[in-house]
């Protein structure tokens, strides 16, 4: 039995060009496949016109969803594919608005129940696949975030920021870890003091007395220690790169594991000095000769 429901038909106007009329379903389909836009106008009587976007029944629900949601975006794409699944030649001939007026008397036959069910099943399958894909992507993102967080936590647990270096203070009392870098300490009396792990880079300690001082692991790089008294000083593992020991007294000092690369030892007294494991790359030896790179524990004259 034929339905008594009145079938709405719509005229479409774009840039003054009027076409139609088209049924509601056709307008919705044209929107999905991009042949019409929401700002195009429609009218039932060619008198009162309004934007398609203002006629709620013409805009498919999937186009009203929040496109920030990947699942809803996938649903929209699946719906577009479903609306556009016929062949290009057939679609151009049968669906484009400019051909609608020519074929009012020769519309395609309505879908059979089986055809409609098959098309709906395909669309549902696409939607399910899109939803599963979105879920997999979300799961992958969660796993990646967990791995990143675990790695960051691991770094926080194992990270050792090392010893905090204090500010330079040339008036600070002698103590382990003091920072006398760039200070002028010429002639200072530092006998038997504990300056282990101190920072005394690029300082002036010429003529200073450091008899039996604890200079273990001290940073004395590029410091002037000329004419200094370093007898019996403990300088194990000290950084003495580029430092000057010209004419200093280093007898009996322990320099095991120290780095004396590029240091100047010319004229220094070194009887009984322990140089086990000490680096002497390009060091100027007591006799003025340059030590070869790779000299360890003793000076290999540079040929």
Image (tube, rainbow, N blue to C red):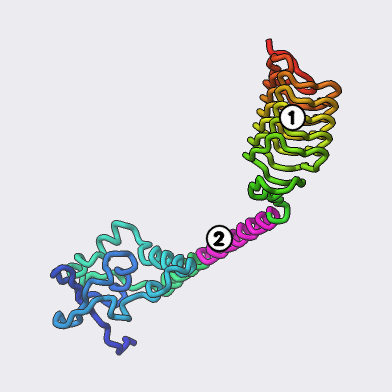
Q: In which quarter of the image is the N terminus?
A: bottom left
Label the magenta part by its dominant secondary structure.
Answer: helix
**Front one among 97 and 288:** 288
Residue at label 1?
228
Depth-wise, is mark 2 or mark 1 nearer the camera?
A: 1
Magenta span of residues: 129-155
Q: Looking at the picture, how far across and down is residue 142, in whole percent?
A: 61, 62
Q: Helix or strand or loop: what does disc 2 sit on?
A: helix
Could you say which quadrant of the image residue 57 lies in? bottom left
Count residues near mark 1 (Cα–Cα under 10 Å), then give few for <14, some for 14-19, many for 20+.
Answer: many
User: Residue drawn at (18%, 79%), measured in percent from left and top?
Assistant: 49
Q: Looking at the picture, how far across and down is residue 65, in whole percent?
A: 41, 74
Residue 207 visible in the snapshot: yes
Could you say which quadrant of the image residue 37 lies in? bottom left
Question: In the figure, is residue 80 to the left or right of 269?
Answer: left
Work out how far the residue at label 2 is from the one at label 1, CA to CA, in angstroms. Answer: 70 Å
Give the vertical position of 12 relative to 277 (above or below): below
Residue 118 visible in the snapshot: no
Question: In the figure, is residue 143 to the left or right of 194?
Answer: left
Residue at label 2?
137
Q: Helix or strand or loop: what does disc 1 sit on?
A: loop
């Amino acid at each position: 039995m034929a339905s008594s429901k009145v079938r709405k038909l719509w005229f479409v106007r774009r840039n003054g060009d009027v076409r139609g009329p088209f049924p509601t379903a056709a307008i919705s389909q044209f929107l999905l496949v991009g042949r019409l836009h929401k700002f195009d106008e429609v009218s039932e009587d060619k008198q009162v016109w309004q934007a398609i976007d203002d006629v709620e029944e013409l805009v498919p629900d999937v186009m009203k969803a929040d496109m920030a949601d990947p699942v809803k975006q996938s649903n929209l794409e699946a719906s577009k594919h479903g609306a556009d699944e016929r062949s290009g030649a057939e679609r151009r001939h049968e669906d484009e608005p400019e051909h609608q007026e020519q074929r009012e008397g020769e519309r395609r036959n309505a879908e059979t129940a089986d055809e409609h069910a098959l098309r709906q099943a395909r669309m549902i399958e696409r939607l399910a696949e899109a939803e599963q894909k979105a879920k997999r992507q979300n799961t992958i993102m969660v796993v990646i975030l967990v791995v990143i967080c675990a790695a960051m936590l691991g770094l926080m647990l194992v990270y050792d920021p090392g010893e905090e270096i204090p500010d330079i203070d040339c008036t600070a009392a002698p103590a382990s870890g003091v920072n006398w870098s760039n200070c002028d300490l010429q002639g200072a009396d530092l006998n038997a003091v504990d300056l282990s792990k101190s920072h005394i880079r690029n300082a002036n300690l010429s003529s200073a007395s450091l008899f039996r001082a604890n200079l273990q692991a001290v940073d004395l790089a590029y410091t002037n220690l000329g004419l200094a008294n370093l007898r019996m000083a403990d300088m194990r593992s000290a950084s003495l790169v580029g430092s000057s020991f010209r004419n200093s007294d280093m007898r009996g000092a322990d320099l095991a594991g120290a780095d004396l690369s590029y240091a100047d030892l010319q004229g220094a007294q070194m009887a009984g000095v322990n140089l086990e494991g000490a680096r002497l790359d390009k060091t100027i030896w007591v006799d003025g000769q340059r030590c070869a790179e790779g000299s360890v524990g003793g000076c290999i004259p540079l040929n």
